[in-house]
Amino acid sequence: MTLDVAIFFISAIVAVFGATMMITVRNPVASVLYLLVSFAAQAVLFIQLGALFLGVVLIIVYVGAILVLFLFVVMLLNLRGGEDLGQPSRPMSRFSKYLIGALLLVELVFVIRGSAGGTDQTVTGMMGPVVETFGSVQDVGMLLFTTYLYPFELTGVLLLVAIVGAVVIAKRETEREAAQKKQLVEERGHSSEEKVS
Amino acid sequence: MEVQLPEVSLRMMAPELFLFVWALVVITFDVVTKRAQGESVGYLTMVGIAITGGILAITGEGPGFGNMFYNDPMAIFFKIIFLGAAFMAVGSSFGLTKQKIVNHRGEFFGLMLLSTVGMMFLASANELLTIWIGLELTTIPLFVLAAFFKDNKLSVESGLKYFIVGAFSSAVMVYGLSFLYGLTGTTDLLQMKLNLATVHLTFRNIGVILIAAITMLIAGIGFKLGLPPFHQWVPDVYEGAPTPVAAFLSIGSKAAGLAAFAKIFVNGLSAFHGVEMAPNDWGKLAGIVAIAALILGNTVAIRQTNIKRMLGYSSIAQAGYIMIGMVAQSALGLSAVAFYIFAYMFANMGAFAVVTAFEDKTGSCEIKSYAGLAKTSPMLSICMTIFLLSLAGIPPLAGFLAKYFVFAAAIKQASLEGGQWLYWVVGAGLITAVFSLYYYANVIKQMYFSKDDSPYRVGLQAPAMLVVLIGLAGVLVFGLYPEPVLRFAGEVPSMFGFVSP
C-alpha cells in the first residue's frame, strides 16, 4: 500500500466518521465540531485529487469562517441537548427519512459499481483530458473571470438579495415605527389585526 | 495567458439590468423618504415594471453572454409572463402596504422586483449553472416575502417552511445537475444534448447515473412546482404568506420552475423520452407525477374551507395540467404549456386580487364569509366568478382554450407509436377537470345563492381595480381571440430543435 492510498483511506474514514457523528450527537456544539473535522478531511481529499485551490478554499472559507460563525451562533443561542431540541420525530416521518436514506445508499452503490467497470467508464471520456495546471488558482481564476463571468456576477446579485432579506427579517422595529403601526391599527380598529394575534 | 471573453452584449440584458437597478432605486427611495411615503413606493414599482416591459419589447433576440444568456422567443414569452405577474401582484398589494406593512415597504416591493429579475435571468439561461442560480435568485426573495408579517405566527411558519423546503429541494436539484455534469463534462445544454446523444448512440446504454440524475431533477423541480409527493408545503405557505405574495408565488415561481423544467428536460434530455429509452425515460416519471398532481390537487381542494388553501391545492392541480403539455414532448406541447401559463396568469392573479381586497376589508379568508357577496358587491362577484370559471376551464374563457391545447397536444403525441401511455395522463386530466368545477363553483354558490346579504361591502382601490380589469380583459379577450398569443406561443419551441410537425 502506497502512502497515497493510505492517506486517502485515513482521510475518507475521518470524513465519513465526522459526518456521521455530526448528525448523531445531540449536543449542537459537538455537532459543529464534528462537521469541522469532516470538512478538514474532505479538504485533504480534494488536494489529493489535484484540486488544490478547492481544498484550500474549503479550509479557509468553511472551516475558518463559516463554521466558526456557526459555533458563535450556537453558543449565543445556548442550546443544550435534550428538551431544547424538541421531541424525537414520529414513526411515520422517521420511516420516510430512513427510506430516503436507504434509496440514496442503493443509488450510491449502483453508481460506484457502474463506474468501476461497467459501461459508465466509457462515459468519463466526455470530461476531456485533465490539463497540467488543473485546479491551480490561476486556472480557477481564469475560468471564473472569463467563461463563467456571467454566473459569477449573478451570484453577486444573489448575495445582495440575501443581505436585503436578512436585514428585513432580522431588524427590530424602532420605537417610531412601532408607534406608527399602533396608530394604524387603532385607526382601523377591527378585524384584520385581530386575526394576526 | 491570453484572456478570451465570450461574446458579451449588454443590450440583450437591458431589461434585467434595468429592473435590477430599479429594485435598488425603490429600496433606496423608501429609505430616503424616511418611509413616510405610503403609496408612492408602490406606484414607483409599477412604473418600473412597465418600463422594463417596454425595454423588453425593443430588445429583440440574440446572445447576451455567449450561449449562457440567450434571448430566444421562449425567453421573451416567459419574461412577459413574469413581468405581468409581478405587475399584478404589486398592484394588488396596495391595501396591504397601507394597513399591515408599515416599515420595509421599499424592501417588500424591492424584493418582489429582485425575484422577478431572477426569473428573467432564468428564462434566458441556456446553461445548468445559470439556470440554477436564476432559480435561487427567484426563490430566496420569496422566502423573505412569505415571512413578511414578522408578528404573525402563520406568516413566519410559512416563510420558514418555504425556506427549509426550498433549500432542501435546491440541494437535491444541484446534486442531480452535478450528475449531469459528471456524465457530459459540460454545463451547456446544447453541448450536453450532443454528448448524451453520442454516448447513447455509441454504447446504447448510459447506465444508472442518468436515472439518478433524472429522478433528482424531477424531485428538485417538483418541489418548486408543488407536484406530489413534494407538495405538502404549498397549502401552508399559501395560507400564511401575505396574499399578493401567495399570488406571485403561484404564477411567478411556478412559471420559473416550468421554464427550468422545459430547458433541462424538454431540451437538454430530449433524447431520453419514449419507449426505446427505457429505463432512462423521464417522460413516464413526469407523467406519473402529473397524474398524481391532478388527482391530489383536485380532490383535496374540495375539502378546503380557506380560500387561500383552496387556491393552493388548485395551483397544484394546474401544475398537473401544465405537465401534461410538457410530457407530450413536442413543439405543440411546449406552445400549449406557454399559452396555458399565460392564460392561467390572468385568471389566477385576478382571483387573488379579489381575495386580497376581500381580506383587506374583512380580515377573513374563509370561503363561508363570501356568502351573499353578490348582493352587496355585485361587480366584484361577477369578476371573481369569471376568474374562477376560467380556472375551471369553462368556454369561452381563456382557461378553456389553455386546457384544450394541452390535451390536444398530448393526444396528438399519444396517437403516435409508443405514446399510448399518454392517454392515461389525458384521461386523468379530463376526469379531474370535472372535480375542479365543484370546488370553484362552491365559492360562486356562496356568493350568489346565499339567503342572507353579506355584511361587507368590498370596494377596490385604483391599482387593485387596474389589476382586476387587466385580468378580466386577459381572460375574455384571449378566450375569444387567442390568435396573436398563439402565434407567439408557436414560436416558443423554435430553439428546441424539434422537427417541425
Image (spheres, coloured by chain):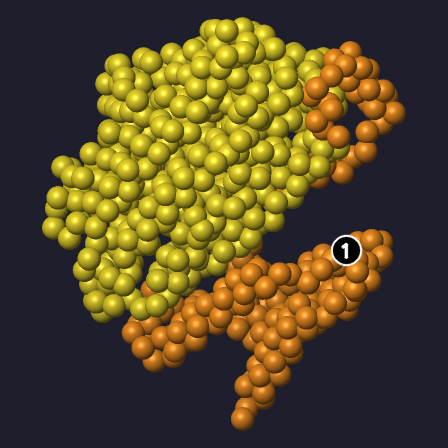
The residue positioned farthest toward the front in the image shown: B451
Quadrant in the rendering for residue A170: top right
Q: Nearer the viewer, residue B459 or A173?
A: B459
Q: Does any portion of residue B347 appear in the rendered image?
A: no
**Can you give x and y, in whole percent of width and height, for residue B295 in the image?**
37, 43
Q: Is residue A3 above or below residue B378?
A: below
Residue B453 showing in the rendered view: yes
Residue B297 x/y as whole percent:
42, 40
Residue drawn at (27%, 57%) of the image: B281
Residue at 43 percent across and 75 percent down: it is A109
Of residue A185 and residue B250, the one placed in the foreground of this image is: A185
Q: Which chain is yellow?
A: B
Callout 1 secondary element: helix
* Colour of the chain lettered A: orange
Residue to which mark 1 is pinned = A69
Is B6 situated left or right of B138 in this image?
A: left
